[in-house]
Image (tube, grey):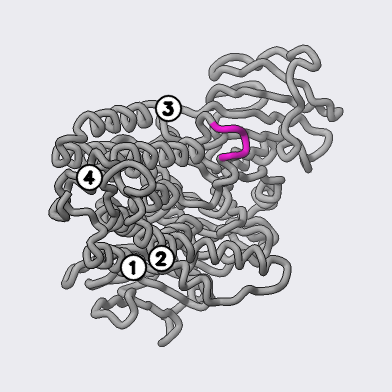
Amino acid sequence: MGSATALAAFGLSLLVVLAASGRGVPAGVPESLDGLRVLPLALLPWVALAGLPPGPRRANLPGGVHRIAGLALGLPILALAARLDHGVGVAVRELATVGLVGLSLAAILALAAPRSPGHGWSARAPLLPFGLLWSGLVLLPPMLELVLVEVARGRGPGPPWPGPISAASPLGWLGRRAAGASDPGSGEFALLLCALLLVLARLTGRDGSPSEGR
Amino acid sequence: MLGLGPLLLALLPQAPAGPVGIVWVRMEGPLEGLRVEAGGPPTRVELSLGPGEVRLAPLPVEGPPLGRPGALGPGELTLTPLPEGGAGRAWVLEWEAPLQTLPPVALDPRSPGSTPALERLSRRSRPPLAPARITASGADLALVLALALGGLALRRRPLSAVGLGLAGAALICVLPAAQRATGEVRVLEGDLGSGAWIEVRSALGRLPLETRELALPATRPEGCERSFWVELGGPGPERWWALAPGCGLSLARRVPAPGLDLERNDLGRLEPLWLRTVDGHWEARAPWEPGRPPPPVLPPGSRPPPPAWLAASLPQGRLVLVAGLARAPNAPPGERWVRVVGP
């Protein structure tokens, strides 16, 4: 996770905390978040952006902790989000689950993120298969659920299958946690899915490890 | 017997509650939670016990068997250790029921502790409620930004950056709690004619029960699901909550006369302050400092009229004082109001 990506995620998390606190946001924004949990919302940008490839300048850095170090930038703001939730009565166990699983998801996705060997579209072209995979597994399920819910609105209950599928996606799982869903799951499917992405990235050599001859 | 004090429960009339008792339960790990049911809304307990760990705790339980003297019959009270099917166990040691034998007495006209004056006080209009909200303080945000800048400065030393992030997160977790913009509203209700005083706490969806304040929270509108929630996970004493998602909860307790009448204020700073005269005319008054004589009348139009819920449904032909009560240092957060009807 590059510094620019981490900064962007930090900024979005900060916006979530500010909105939930009613600081520097238009009237009515805090009320629109009533009933939502702050920590999963603040984690969403980290999980959503962790899979982005870092810039070319970081392509030659070794793997491991270098790849997930950007997440450290988010720990304080996420702790603050957790404290806001705890203040309105969200249980410590719930916060610990969301925090640990959410950070694990972001870390795995950051490790799986491919690296671009250079500038320009041609240099990024090899990243396309991973991008499609990431979109299909992480982004698409919750979007599909949202679309189907909207389509079904006013026409009776929608189909039951998008919910469980969405819950298996990292973003969908966090969204369900944010909404305080009664059956959000403990995140094991989302973790498995991210681990699958990591394995696929390694198998296909798209993780951009320095040994790839760059 | 628990030291419940001279408490009572004023229940909004829309939703009569069932009898409540205190059940002492012994829990043996591994346990992640416990559900207790006695035919009424469930009591949910959150805790974390490792294998072999034991915890003893009093739990509020609501249900018909708790309103009946004598022993609980087999199957009348169900304990479900969580996760279900695990090795954890829980069993009842003793119970304190029915509620009528406890010092707090419900404001039910059939209750021996109830008086018409208390009942009238409990039926006064209640405030509009908003959800509780926590705000991050400026110091919190400044600390987070400083830590983020530190993390950026250390971006080429990832282990140091991770260490700083972890230390910063730990620091934020242990710092004093963020400012709470609570949705809780407290109203001190007094009737100088009878000398009856109650304090009513109202909140939306979730109301902490203070110091073993065994309560039957009322819900509105009728039909809202209500339950008790007990947290045993922390190092301190258990914390009890009444829950009714999306519904208003009100809880009242009888309190001693707080040193306030129409001529004397030993309670605290009252602002804004209105007095209704015997002919029904509301007049705004200047702030009333404790220990001072009653403040002068403010010019008409200098202050808006009192909130409608505070001024509604009060007895006619009597002086009425309504005011906001300044929060004392270290007092729990939330709005505070006083409503006193003269003799």
The residue where tag 1 is placed is A193
Of the numbered discs 4 and 2, the one sitting upstream in the chain is 4
**Whole-Å distance between the Cαs marked 4 and 1?**
25 Å
Of the numbered discs 4 and 1, the one sitting upstream in the chain is 4
Tell me: residue A41, above or below residue B45: above
Q: Are marks 1 and 2 on the same chain?
A: yes
**What subunit carries mark 1?**
A
Q: Amino acid at mark 1?
A: Leu
The residue where tag 4 is placed is A59
* Left-right relation of A209 to A194: left
| Mark 1 in CB contact with mark 2 (< 8 angstroms) | yes
Q: Which circle marks residue A137 in the picture?
A: 2
Image quadrant where one finds the C terminus of chain B: top right
Residue B81, given in percent of the width and then of the height, sits at 33, 76
**Whole-Å distance between the Cαs marked 4 and 2?**
24 Å
Q: Are marks 3 and 2 on the same chain?
A: no
How crowded is the residue under tag 4: few (<14 C-alpha within 10 Å), some, or many (20+)? many
**Nearer to us: label 4 or label 1:** 4
